[in-house]
Structure formats: C-alpha cells, structure tokens
Image: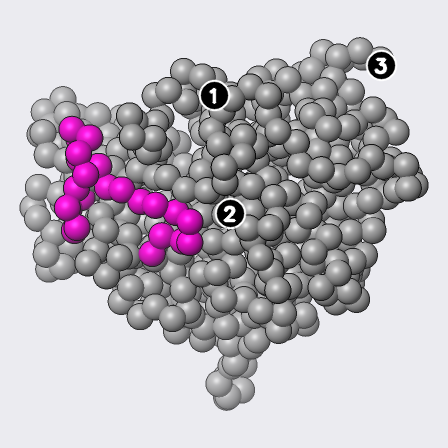
C-alpha cells in the first residue's frame, strides 16, 4: 500500500514500485522496446554507478538535454539515486537559452545525446560553455548509451538536508535536487528550485485526481525535460500503471502506437487535444464511400488529460464527441507542477468551464489588487501554498517579489473559485488587453470564438493603438481556408454579440493564418510573435 508520508525521495519511490510491481511493464516505446518497473530500477542503479565513476555524486549539478525516451528516464533516476542536482534542458533550446541556463545554474556536467535529429548537441554545449578537454563544464555524450558500473560500490541512498535555510517541506529543510527554468520568448528564463518532496507531492496530486490504476496504460509524448515529465512518472510509480513513451509527437504515428499498446490515457496540452481531433477527422474524411461508420481513433482511450494552456469549451465538446472519451484538463506551472485538476467524475459543465478543484495538498487563495482575499466567485489573482510549491528561485530578488507577507506565491494568473470549489481561470495579468481603460480578458473572447463553426483555432491579442491604447485583434485559423465567402470580421463580431459579449470587447481587427505559431515544450501559442507580426496593421 502506497503511503506518501513515508516516502521522501524519488529513489525511495522507485524502490517501492520495483518491489510492488516486480515483472510488470513500466514503459513501451515506439520501436518495440519495453522495460519493467524492477528493470528500470536495476538499469538506473548500473547507470548511477557509471556516472559516479565520472565524478558525479550527491550535490553535483548535472544538466541534461536529452530526448523523451526510456534511456532519459533511466539517466534521470540514476541521478536521483546519487542525490545529484538535476537541471533538465528542453532539446529544442539552442545557444542562447542553453548558455544562459548553464551559467545561471552553475552546472558542472552536461549529458547530451550527441547528434540528435541532425543537430550536434555536443558541439553546441562545448561552444556556449567555453569548455575544452579537462576544463569548464564537463560534457558527457550518451549517444552510445549511458555509462554503466557495478551498483555494489554505490554509497547508501539517504535523503540530504540543505544546510542553508530555505523553505521547509513536510517539516524538513529539504535540499534542492532539481532546477527547472521557465520558458519565455523575451525575458531570460527564471531558475526554479524544486526538491524531490515537492515533485512527489505534485505527482501524488495528479495520480489522485486521475484515479489511474495498473489496468491503465498512459502515455508521454511531450518533452520529458518539462516539469510534467517527472510529475507523470511519479504518478506512474504511485499508481503502478505503464506508459508509452515517444521521442516526438506526430499525431498519426502516436495514434497508431497507442492503438497497438491499448493506451487508455493520452494528452499533454490543449495543442495535443486539437491534434488528435484533427487526425481523427482527417482519417474519417479519407474513408471510402460506403465503408460504414469508422470507430474512434484510439479505441482503448478513455481519458484525454493535460494542461499548460486554456481549454476552449467548444474544443472540449468536439474532442470528446470525436474521440469518444472523457477530457479532463488541469492547471500547473513550473513553480507548482500540479495546482488544480479535473477528474473523470466531474460533470461535463465542470470539465468544460473549469480546471477542476485544487489537487490534494494544494491551497488556492484568490487575491484582490490590495492583497485581501476575494469572496467566493469574485475574480482576482491566483495565489498558492502547498507541498508541491517550489522552494525558491535561484535569484533571491525574484523569490522576494513572488511571495506575499502571508507566504502565498503569486502566479500572475487571474481566476475565481466557484461555489462548487472548482477554479475558473480568466486570463493572465500580462494577457489583459486595456482598451480605453477597460480591462478585457483575451481568454474570454477566445473561448467564444471557438464556438463559431468556421473557426478551427483562435488567439486574441492586444495591439498598440493611438486612440484606444490597445485594440483587440482576433487571429484565426479557419476550418476551411478556401471557403467562399471567406470568414469576415463582421461575421465574427455578429457571432460574438449573439453570444452576449459586450460591445467594448469586440475585436476590431481580424487576421487569418494557416497555422498559429507555437513553441515551448507544450506547444503554446506564441502571442508575442503574433503581436510583432500584426502590430503595424489594422
């Protein structure tokens, strides 16, 4: 029986599951390889011994920029066994981001995949870190596999304590064992310090909300270096279910592998839901006339789950109908991997219009601009406490600015708590359009735009305007770009007015695109790119 209070480190959780699920599968990949829970433990021990022979031990700062595959999970768990400080780096990051992260985190070692998808990560890291043989950051290529050794020589695994103060977790001053970096297109990433305990609390929150069991088969097709990677693996270790792991997300390939493996839960973010919806519709459209009704894209699928971006209610309804499964959406961030989550037991109304209730261990407080607590149903900034909340930023000034006098972390997200306890997110403080002094939520308009039958995807941005301060611009990917007549601003604003949107919030500019620009580990829409592209128009 899993007892989270008795487990303080990720490695203890690995050992627990290896004993409880001996011989049971943990991962399948897209090329037919698999590994059991106890096999993963044994491989990680051998890798830990190999890494220790290179000089890596407790407290050593090790960055890794590795693809999403079984070997990467082995490497990460091996570092957890050694008590190293892990610094995951998204594989898409290049010289600017990698150079900043290595310098800011004080990384001593970097694990790289060698040449991956035509790009030489070893050469890049050597260049940005200014390291030659024997000096600076030590670059370790795992192109030929992880180093291996005899686990008998490993020191005892015991949780370490941080000697220098910091936030206490579960009554213990826990050591920082993970440094993540927030993604962004304009500002430098922020270093976010986590402990094994904070990540375990997030994974337990996810596992509890989703109610997965050993009979399920999950999936990881998003970058494992994202904080959602360990969060998901911890949920697997807690609940004992296996998962398919893919090194890249291609909807058609993913659907085929998931069908073969009987995946019951898929997802990752809103972009993944949309991709599966589009793939299902594409395949239905290719069926020969008279072939009869097509079955669902992934027949075994019972649950789509994810977070990372707003979920338009219309996408919720369309994906559920098309894929014939439930869709549960959640809310988290690098600083707090799990904050709120829908569950398979929530109603359609709750799942379509909220991000669920706070997960076990999370405390949400909605704050007014003056810092006082908002009433139930009143909108304000989402602030947090909880066991899964990060320890601190690497920059003390950022830490001081992020927490209020009561110890609550200020997320920068806007929302409200409904009488049923569910959280509704209404936008970002930085994603508010100020038009003639009126605060307008981009997300509110986006949700309504997605209900128009001709709109496949939409993003709403504020653009500089001499008279208004900002004007509202809708950027839309039409369902049919060749439709005659084409989608017009008048048609969209008429639809929004019929839906009850106040006149002051109506878009004053419409731009249609073939694709919305996306980036980051969860393929979020890059609104900064759209603002720069369309700022001079209108």
Foreground mark, 2 or 3, reads: 2
Residue 275 is situated, as x and y percent measured from the top left of the image, at: 48, 58
Q: Earlier in the sequence, mark 2 or mark 1?
A: 1
Q: Residue at x 47, y 17 (%)?
A: 395
Q: Earlier in the sequence, mark 2 or mark 3?
A: 3
Which residue is under mark 3?
A: 133
As drawn, the label of residue 188 is 1
Between the residue at mark 1 and the residue at mark 3, the CA separation in whole angstroms equals: 29 Å
Between the residue at mark 2 and the residue at mark 1, the CA separation in whole angstroms equals: 28 Å
Q: Viewed as shown, does residue 263 lie left or right of 468?
A: right
Image height of 280 relative to 365, above or below: below
Foreground mark, 2 or 1, reads: 2
Q: Viewed as shown, does residue 491 lie left or right of 357?
A: left
Residue 321 is situated, as x and y percent measured from the top left of the image, at: 39, 73
Q: Which residues are magenta?
A: 357-379
Secondary structure predominantly adopted by residues drawn in magenta: loop
């Amino acid at each position: 029986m899993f007892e989270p209070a008795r487990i303080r480190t990720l490695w203890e959780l690995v050992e627990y599951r290896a004993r409880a699920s001996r011989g049971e599968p943990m991962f399948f990949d897209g090329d037919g390889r698999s590994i059991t829970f106890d096999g993963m433990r044994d491989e990680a021990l051998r890798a830990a011994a190999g890494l220790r022979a290179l000089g890596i031990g407790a407290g050593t700062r090790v960055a890794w920029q590795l693809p999403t595959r079984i070997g990467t999970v082995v490497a990460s768990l091996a570092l957890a066994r050694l008590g190293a400080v892990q610094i995951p780096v998204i594989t898409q990051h290049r010289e600017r981001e990698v150079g900043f992260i290595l310098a800011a985190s004080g990384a001593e070692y970097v694990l790289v995949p060698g040449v991956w998808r035509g790009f030489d990560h070893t050469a890049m890291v050597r260049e940005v870190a200014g390291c030659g043989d024997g000096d600076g950051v030590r670059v370790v290529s795992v192109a030929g596999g992880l180093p291996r050794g005899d686990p008998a020589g490993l020191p005892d695994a015991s949780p370490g304590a941080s000697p220098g103060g910091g936030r206490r977790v579960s009554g213990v001053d826990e050591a920082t064992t993970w440094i993540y970096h927030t993604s962004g297109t304009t500002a430098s990433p922020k270093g976010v310090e986590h402990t094994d305990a904070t990540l375990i609390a997030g994974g337990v929150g996810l596992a509890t909300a989703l109610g997965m069991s050993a009979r399920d088969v999950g999936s990881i097709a998003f970058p494992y270096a994202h904080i959602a990677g360990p969060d998901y693996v911890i949920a697997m270790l807690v609940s004992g279910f296996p998962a398919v792991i893919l090194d890249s997300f291609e909807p058609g390939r993913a659907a085929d592998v998931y069908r073969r493996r009987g995946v019951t839960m898929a997802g990752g973010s809103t972009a993944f839901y949309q991709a599966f919806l589009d793939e299902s519709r594409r395949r239905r459209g290719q069926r020969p006339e008279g072939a009869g009704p097509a079955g669902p894209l992934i027949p075994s699928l019972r649950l789509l789950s994810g977070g990372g971006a707003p979920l338009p209610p219309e996408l919720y309804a369309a994906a559920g109908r098309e894929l014939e499964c439930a869709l549960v959406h959640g809310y988290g961030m690098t600083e707090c991997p799990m904050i709120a989550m829908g569950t398979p037991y929530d109603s359609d109304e709750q799942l379509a219009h909220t991000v669920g209730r706070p997960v076990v261990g999370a405390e949400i407080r909605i704050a007014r601009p003056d810092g006082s607590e908002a009433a139930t149903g009143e909108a304000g900034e989402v602030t947090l406490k909880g066991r899964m909340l990060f320890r601190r930023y690497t920059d003390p000034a950022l830490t001081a600015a992020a927490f209020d006098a009561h110890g609550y972390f200020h997320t920068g997200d806007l929302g409200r708590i409904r009488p049923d306890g569910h959280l509704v997110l209404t936008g970002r403080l930085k994603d508010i359009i100020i038009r003639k002094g009126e605060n307008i939520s981009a997300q509110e308009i986006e949700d309504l735009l997605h209900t128009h039958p001709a709109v496949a995807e939409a993003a709403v941005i504020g653009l500089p305007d001499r008279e208004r301060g900002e004007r509202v611009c809708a950027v839309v990917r039409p369902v049919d770009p060749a439709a005659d007549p084409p989608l017009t601003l008048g048609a969209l604003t008429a639809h929004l007015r019929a839906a009850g949107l106040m006149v002051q919030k109506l878009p004053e500019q419409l731009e249609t695109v073939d694709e919305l620009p996306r980036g980051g580990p969860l393929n979020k829409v890059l609104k900064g790119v759209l603002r720069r592209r369309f700022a001079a128009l209108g």
